[in-house]
Amino acid sequence: INSGCLARNKILKSGDFGSVVEIKDDVMKENRGIEVLSLPKAETIGENFLQRNRDLNTLVAPRLKTLKEGAFYLNEGLRELELPSLEVLEDHNFAINKLKKIYQ
């Protein structure tokens, strides 16, 4: 998915990106509506991917290996997150959020 293509979208409520392996920077930055996101094959998420997304409460990403800087910065909807394949976690990914648990 290319950089910024769904940024500031207020209509999309859920997304299933079943064949996507790599997500570029800023794709869903400041996206106010999405609540459920499925990324079953994604291995890399770019910088600021879901920055300032207040509504996301469910993320499915079992193959995610790399989270670039700030991917979940200021994301207030997520409470729990499971990332069983995570290998690389760059700076500021979970800063200013309401996460209670992160499972690996």
Image (cartoon, grey):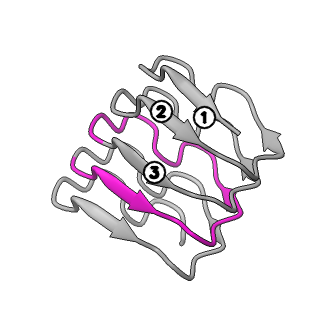
Marks 2/3: CA–CA distance = 9 Å
Part of the protein shown in magenta = 33-55
Residue 99 image position (x, y, % from top left): 47, 23
Whether tag 2 and tag 3 are in contact, CB under 8 A, the answer is no
Residue at 33% x, 43% y is 56
10 Å crowding of disc 1: few (<14), some (14-19), many (20+): many
Residue at 45% x, 51% y is 59
Residue denoted by label 1: 70
Q: Main secondary structure of the magenta part?
A: loop
Marks 1/3: CA–CA distance = 16 Å
Residue at 36% x, 27% y is 76
Whether tag 2 and tag 1 are in contact, CB under 8 A, the answer is no
Marks 2/1: CA–CA distance = 17 Å
Residue at 40% x, 34% y is 78
Residue 29 image position (x, y, % from top left): 42, 46
Residue denoted by label 3: 59
Single out the mark in the foreground, 2 or 1.
2
Quarter of the rendering containing residue 94: top right
The one nearer the camera, 76 or 101, is 101
Q: Mark 3 or mark 1, which is nearer the start of the sequence?
A: 3
Amino acid of disc 2: Glu
Question: Could you tell whether 65 is left or right of 50 in the image?
Answer: right
